[in-house]
Image: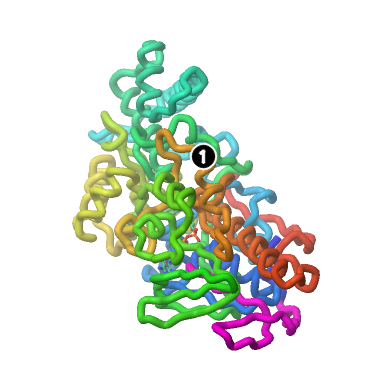
């Protein structure tokens, strides 16, 4: 339970002795949070409520990071995260979403195939615009599950890791009866395409050993109908936030940290929470002094980061079937595609094209207009009478220097404990963000939890140094969460 929604901040206690570059002034413990995504904002909120002096440095001119609700159509549309994965009270974000009264629209329930789609929620078409019969979609969905079970056997028999794609081909060699032909094969490729979307990566790079190690909460998947931004804004209320502050150097000393931003300005504190994306850490654009230990650098290098994007198309009116997803099946998963129908959840005539992996990377090389045209051409294949969009939005999470990727995933041959290694603190640096979440990587609720965890570790460590652990409120665990039911429509 985040204590961040308390309106009255406990009184700062004085008397902790902190030497700031020789100033020797008595002051309260202090922390710099780097990165204003959900992880950073949650950490900053928790430490502020635990009476720390907190400053949050964010490189963009907005908060939220990979939570990005855009309002340029006159209503909220999420260009980054839009689902709450696991619509249930066990979800770490549920108390906050419940208390804010934010409605959720469930696109799939507990009976999801693989992770995020159930069999009733979509309409699939071939390239000629013929709808795939629903019985075939259901049958192939069941076959897909059987194939996945067979890959499990392959995993158990082999010490060496391999890609999901390789495991599929081994299964087909052993069980030719699971091979599908013609239209059924194309539908199977569509399932694979959806699986690749979940990891934002291609099946030849996803680890057989690691792909299902995350924890899936019950309750299916719910779209945040009013966008995710209210969650960020609530957590950020009253904090000292410096937008447009791109951190370029993080130096740690025996008694604190010194953080430098692009224009040379420096900030000092007892500790820092580093809540920047894995892609940015990989790019080495932030200098750590002294350098991070080898085990941390290796974890940064080895954990995968994939790309998923959204091309949001706003139409004059609805001309498509009333389903959650529209899909195009093809010979290869690269050729398949899908659109999320936002009309069902929000009432607005909007379709969201969502490419992932290599396709997303290829589309990022195009101009916005060309990307929109590409998505529209996919739509025209299945609905030849489709009218052109009146407005659009295009995300570029792979090339945006503030993210350099969409979310993390397990690559072939690398251990799942990389997430934990990314999280482990180094001296007075505490790490947070989706890529530090062992249980829920690549998600908003996972990133949120790591923010709280880093805040609590930081609080303990800083106060232990002064022998003051009992003087300050714990970051979490003392409040009994108020149970407010989630507002869910569909199912
Ligand atoms: C297209 C897409 C769809 C997604 N869909 C879902 C979904 O439906 N449900 C779900 O649960 N998750 C989804 N995710 C994943 C989810 O968005 C992320 O896991 C989560 O938002 C990550 O939060 P974070 O705080 O770890 O990182 P971020 O939100 O990326 O925050 C990091 C912050 O650090 C800032 N920063 C970067 N460099 C610097 C620097 N040098 N100095 C200072 N600040 C810096 C960034 O600007 C950013 O604000 C999706 C992601 C994408 C991209």
Q: Residue at x 79, y 60 (%)?
A: 480
Residue 223 visible at all: no
Horizontal arrangement in the rendering, residue 102 relative to residue 372 (left or right): right
Image coords of residue 270 (percent x, y): 60, 74
The overriding secondary structure of the stretch rendered in magenta is loop
- Residue 19 painted magenta: yes
Name which residue lies at 55% across and 66% down: 273
Q: Which residue is mark 1?
A: 416
3 to the left or right of 159: right
Find residue 245 and report its image quarter: bottom left
Dot 1, crowdedness within 10 Å: few (<14), some or many (≥20)?
A: some
Specify the quarter for ligand 1.
bottom left
| Quadrant of the frame with the C terminus | top right
Q: Nearer the viewer, residue 319 or 336?
A: 336
Q: Is residue 309 above or below residue 43?
A: above
Instruction: Tell whether position 144 is magenta.
Output: no
The residue under the point 63% across, 61% down is: 452
Q: Is residue 248 above or below residue 366?
A: below
Describe residue 488's horizontal placement relative to residue 405 as left or right.
right
Kindly tell me whether residue 404 is visible in this rendering: yes
Q: Quadrant of the N terminus?
A: bottom right
Q: Which residues are magenta?
A: 7-35
């Amino acid at each position: 339970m985040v204590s961040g929604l308390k309106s009255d901040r406990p009184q700062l206690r004085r008397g902790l002795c902190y030497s700031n570059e020789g100033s020797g002034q008595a002051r309260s413990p202090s922390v710099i949070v780097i990165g204003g995504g959900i992880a950073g904002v949650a950490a900053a909120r928790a430490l502020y409520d635990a009476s720390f002096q907190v400053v949050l440095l964010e490189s963009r001119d907005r908060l939220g990071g990979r939570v990005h609700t855009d309002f340029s159509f006159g209503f909220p549309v999420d260009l980054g995260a839009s689902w709450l994965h696991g619509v249930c009270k066990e979800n770490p974000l549920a108390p906050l979403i419940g208390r804010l009264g934010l409605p959720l629209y469930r696109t799939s329930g507990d009976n999801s195939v693989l992770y995020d789609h159930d069999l009733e929620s979509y309409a699939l078409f071939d390239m000629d615009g013929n709808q795939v019969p629903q019985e075939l979609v259901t049958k192939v969905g069941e076959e897909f599950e059987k194939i996945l079970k067979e890959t499990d056997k392959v995993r158990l028999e082999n010490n060496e890791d391999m890609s999901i794609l390789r495991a599929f081909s081994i299964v087909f060699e052993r069980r030719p009866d699971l091979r599908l032909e013609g239209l059924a094969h194309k539908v199977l490729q569509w399932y694979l395409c959806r699986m690749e979307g979940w990891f934002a990566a291609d099946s030849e790079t996803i680890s057989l050993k690691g792909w299902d190690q995350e924890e899936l909460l019950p309750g299916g998947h719910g779209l945040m109908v009013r966008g995710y931004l209210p969650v960020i804004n609530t957590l950020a209320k009253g904090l000292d936030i410096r937008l447009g502050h791109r951190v370029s150097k993080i130096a740690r000393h025996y008694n604190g940290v010194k953080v430098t931003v692009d224009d040379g300005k420096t900030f000092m504190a007892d500790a820092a929470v580093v809540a920047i994306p894995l892609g940015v850490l990989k790019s080495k654009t932030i200098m750590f002094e002294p350098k991070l230990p080898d085990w941390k650098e290796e974890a940064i290098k080895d954990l995968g980061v994939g790309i998923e994007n959204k091309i949001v198309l706003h139409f004059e009116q609805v001309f498509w079937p009333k389903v959650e997803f529209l899909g195009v099946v093809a010979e290869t998963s690269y050729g398949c595609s899908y659109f999320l129908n936002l009309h069902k959840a929000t009432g607005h005539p909007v379709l969201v094209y969502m490419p992932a992996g290599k396709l997303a990377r290829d589309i990022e090389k195009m101009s916005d207009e060309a990307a929109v045209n590409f998505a529209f051409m996919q739509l025209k294949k299945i609905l030849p009478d489709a009218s052109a969009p009146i407005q659009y939005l295009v995300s570029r999470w792979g090339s945006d220097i503030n993210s350099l990727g969409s979310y993390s995933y397990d690559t072939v041959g690398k251990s799942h404990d990389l997430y934990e290694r990314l999280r482990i603190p180094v001296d007075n640096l505490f790490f947070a963000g989706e890529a530090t979440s062992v249980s829920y990587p690549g998600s908003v609720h996972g990133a949120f939890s790591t923010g709280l965890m880093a805040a609590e570790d930081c609080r303990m460590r800083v106060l232990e140094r002064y022998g003051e652990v009992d003087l300050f409120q714990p970051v979490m665990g003392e409040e009994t969460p108020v149970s407010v039911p989630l507002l869910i429509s569909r199912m």
